C-alpha cells in the first residue's frame, strides 16, 4: 500500500506522558482513524510517524457518463409528470410500459415443462440456436447454408458479437481499417477502439435533406483502400432511421465488390423494422447472393424483446466450407478468454420460437404488431407537426425513415431545449426513439419539436 508519512518528534519525560500508550519495548504502533501511528523511542525522544493510506487507483480518472444510458438516469431524476424518455431504444406499449412478448412466455413455459438444465453451453453456443439464427438471416434454403459456408457462433447480443468480429479482424487482418457511417450507433466506435482496430467514417447523413447522402457514401467507399471492412446497418439505420433503397443497395454492393472490400453488417432489427423477417434481411442476402464473403452480427434484443438476456450471433459467410470451419474455430478461440461460453436461457427461447411452427407464426404476428405501433406513432407525429407548424417546413423525412428511431434534425442546443423546457429526454444528436412514444403524447412532442426548431438557434 502506498503511503504518505508525517513525522512528529516530541520531548517526553516518560512514554506514559502521551495520551496514546507506548509499551516498554521502545517501539510501538496504534491506529488513529484510517491511519497508522508508529512510535520509536531514542534518547528520551519519542518519534511518531503517521502513515496515511493512498489508493493505488488514485490515478484513474472518472469516466464520462454513457451518452445514451445517461439519458435514462436523468429521466428518472425528473419529477415532472409530462416527462418523456425517448433516449433508449427499447420497445414500450401504448401505456409506455415494458413489454414481454407472449411468445417468449410460452417458450419459457416449454423450458420449464421439459426441465431444461443450466449446464454450460459449448463455446460456440446452443446448436439449435445457431442453426435457427443462420436460417432466419439468410433463408433456410440459402446455398451458403446448404454448402456449409456459414460459421455461426452465439455471441453476447449484438454488442458482444460485434466485439468478437472486431477481434477476428484485429488478429487475422492486421492493419485493416473499418469504415463506419457518419453518424452511427455510439458504441460502434468504442468496440473497434477497444479491439485496437482503426476506423474512419463514410458520409451517410445529409443535414440539408435530413436524408441519405448517397453520393458521398459511394465516393468514400470507393476512396477507401482495397480490402477495407465496411460496416453497414442491415436495416433501420441507427441513429437516423434512413435506409438505402433496394436500388441503392445494389450500387453499394457494386462498389464494395469492385474494391474488394469486406462487408460487415450489423443486423439489430430484423423483423422489427418493417414487420417482415425477409424484407429486413434483404440487404444481407443481396451481398451473399453475389458470392461475397460477409460478416454479420445479429441481435435478438429488439425483435424478441430479449434485452437483458444478451442473445445474438456472429456469422461469417465464407467462400468454402473449409475456410468456414477454420473461421469458426478461431471465433471460438477468441471467445474462450473473453467470456468462455454464452448464456443458455435466451438461446433456448429463440430456438423454441423458431423451431415450433405455432410459436414462429405467433412471433411474426407480434413483430408486425410492434412494428405497426411504431409506424402509427410515426404517422401521428408527422400529422401533428404538419398541422401545427405554419412555417412551410417540409417534415416528410419523418415518414421516410424506418424503425424505432427518428432523426429529427435538431442540433445540440435544440435538443437541450427539448429536455430543459419540455422534459423530453433524448440523445444530443437529435435522435428520438419512437418506441418510447405513445399516440397520446404525439401532440405534446410536436409542440416541443416546433418550439425547439424555430426558437432555439
Image (cartoon, rainbow, N blue to C red):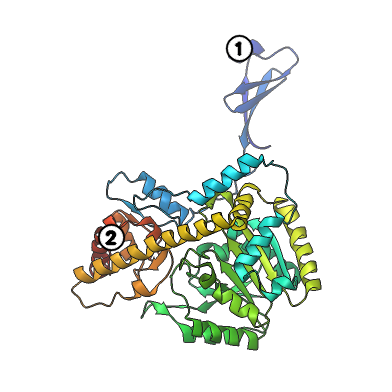
Q: Identify the mark at residue 125; answer none if there is no mark.
A: none
Using the rendered image of the protein, determine whether residue 193 is visible from the camera's viewpoint. Answer: no
Residue shown at 67% from the left, 80% from the top: 292
- Whole-angstrom CA distance, mark 2 to mark 1, is 78 Å
Q: Which percent across, then down, holds residue 373?
A: 37, 60
SS label for mark 2:
helix
Above/below status of 376 relative to 23: below
Residue 38 shown left or right of residue 89 in the figure = right
- Percent coordinates x, y for residue 158 in the rendering: 59, 60
Query: Residue drawn 53% across and 56% down?
Result: 301
Instruction: Say which residue label 1 marks.
Output: 17
Q: Nearer the viewer, residue 90 or 69?
A: 90
- Residue 30 picture quarter: top right
Per the image, label 1 sits on a secondary structure element best described as helix
Q: Quadrant of the N terminus?
A: top right
Image position of 441 (left or right of 320): left
Q: Is residue 85 above or below residue 371?
A: above
Relative to 361, does residue 78 appear above or below in the rendering?
A: above
Image quadrant containing the C terminus: bottom left
Position of residue 127 measured from the top left corner of the image (x, y, whole percent): 71, 56
The residue singled out by tag 2 in the image is 442
61 or 37, nearer to the observer = 61
Q: Earlier in the sequence, mark 2 or mark 1?
A: 1
Q: Residues within 10 Å of mark 2 (few under 14, many from 20)?
A: many
Residue 118 percent location from the top left of the image = 69, 41
Amino acid at each position: 500500500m502506498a503511503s504518505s508519512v508525517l513525522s512528529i518528534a516530541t520531548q517526553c519525560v516518560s512514554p506514559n506522558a502521551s495520551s496514546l500508550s507506548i509499551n516498554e519495548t521502545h517501539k510501538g504502533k496504534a491506529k488513529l482513524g484510517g491511519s497508522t501511528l508508529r512510535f520509536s523511542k531514542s534518547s528520551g525522544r519519542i518519534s511518531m510517524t503517521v502513515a496515511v493510506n493512498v489508493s493505488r487507483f488514485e490515478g484513474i480518472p472518472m469516466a464520462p457518463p454513457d451518452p445514451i444510458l445517461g439519458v435514462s438516469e436523468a429521466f428518472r431524476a425528473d419529477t415532472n409528470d409530462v416527462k418523456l424518455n425517448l433516449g433508449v431504444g427499447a420497445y414500450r406499449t401504448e401505456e409506455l410500459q415494458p413489454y414481454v412478448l407472449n411468445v417468449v412466455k410460452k417458450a419459457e413455459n416449454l423450458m420449464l415443462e421439459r426441465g431444461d438444465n443450466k449446464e454450460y453451453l459449448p463455446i460456440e453456443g446452443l446448436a439449435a440456436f445457431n442453426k435457427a439464427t443462420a436460417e432466419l438471416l439468410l433463408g433456410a434454403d440459402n446455398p451458403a447454408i446448404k454448402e456449409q459456408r456459414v460459421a455461426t457462433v452465439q455471441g453476447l447480443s449484438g454488442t458482444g458479437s460485434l466485439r468478437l468480429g472486431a477481434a477476428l479482424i484485429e488478429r487475422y487482418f492486421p492493419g485493416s481499417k473499418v469504415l463506419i457511417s457518419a453518424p452511427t450507433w455510439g458504441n460502434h466506435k468504442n468496440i473497434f477502439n477497444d479491439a485496437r482496430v482503426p476506423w474512419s467514417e463514410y458520409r451517410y447523413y445529409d443535414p440539408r435533406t435530413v436524408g441519405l447522402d448517397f453520393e458521398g457514401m459511394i465516393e468514400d467507399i470507393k476512396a477507401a483502400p482495397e480490402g477495407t471492412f465496411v460496416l453497414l446497418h442491415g436495416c433501420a439505420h441507427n441513429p437516423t432511421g434512413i435506409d438505402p433503397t433496394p436500388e441503392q443497395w445494389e450500387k453499394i454492393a457494386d462498389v464494395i465488390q469492385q474494391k474488394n472490400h469486406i462487408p460487415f453488417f450489423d443486423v439489430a432489427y430484423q423483423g422489427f423494422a418493417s414487420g417482415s423477417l425477409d424484407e429486413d434481411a434483404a440487404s444481407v442476402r443481396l451481398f451473399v447472393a453475389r458470392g461475397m464473403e460477409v460478416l454479420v452480427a445479429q441481435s435478438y434484443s429488439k425483435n424478441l424483446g430479449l434485452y437483458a438476456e444478451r442473445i445474438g450471433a456472429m456469422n461469417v459467410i465464407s467462400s468454402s466450407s473449409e475456410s468456414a470451419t477454420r473461421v469458426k474455430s478461431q471465433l471460438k478461440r477468441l471467445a474462450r478468454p473473453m467470456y468462455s461460453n454464452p448464456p443458455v436461457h435466451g438461446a433456448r427461447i429463440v430456438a423454441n420460437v423458431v423451431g415450433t411452427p405455432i410459436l414462429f407464426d405467433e412471433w411474426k404476428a407480434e413483430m408486425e404488431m410492434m412494428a405497426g405501433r411504431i409506424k402509427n406513432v410515426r404517422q401521428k407525429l408527422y400529422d401533428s407537426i404538419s398541422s401545427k407548424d405554419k412555417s412551410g417546413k417540409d417534415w416528410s423525412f419523418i415518414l421516410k425513415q424506418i424503425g424505432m428511431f427518428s432523426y429529427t434534425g435538431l442540433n445540440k442546443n435544440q435538443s437541450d431545449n427539448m429536455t430543459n423546457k419540455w422534459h423530453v429526454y433524448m440523445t444530443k444528436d437529435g435522435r428520438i426513439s419512437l418506441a418510447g412514444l405513445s399516440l397520446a403524447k404525439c401532440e405534446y412532442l410536436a409542440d416541443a419539436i416546433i418550439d425547439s426548431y424555430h426558437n432555439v438557434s
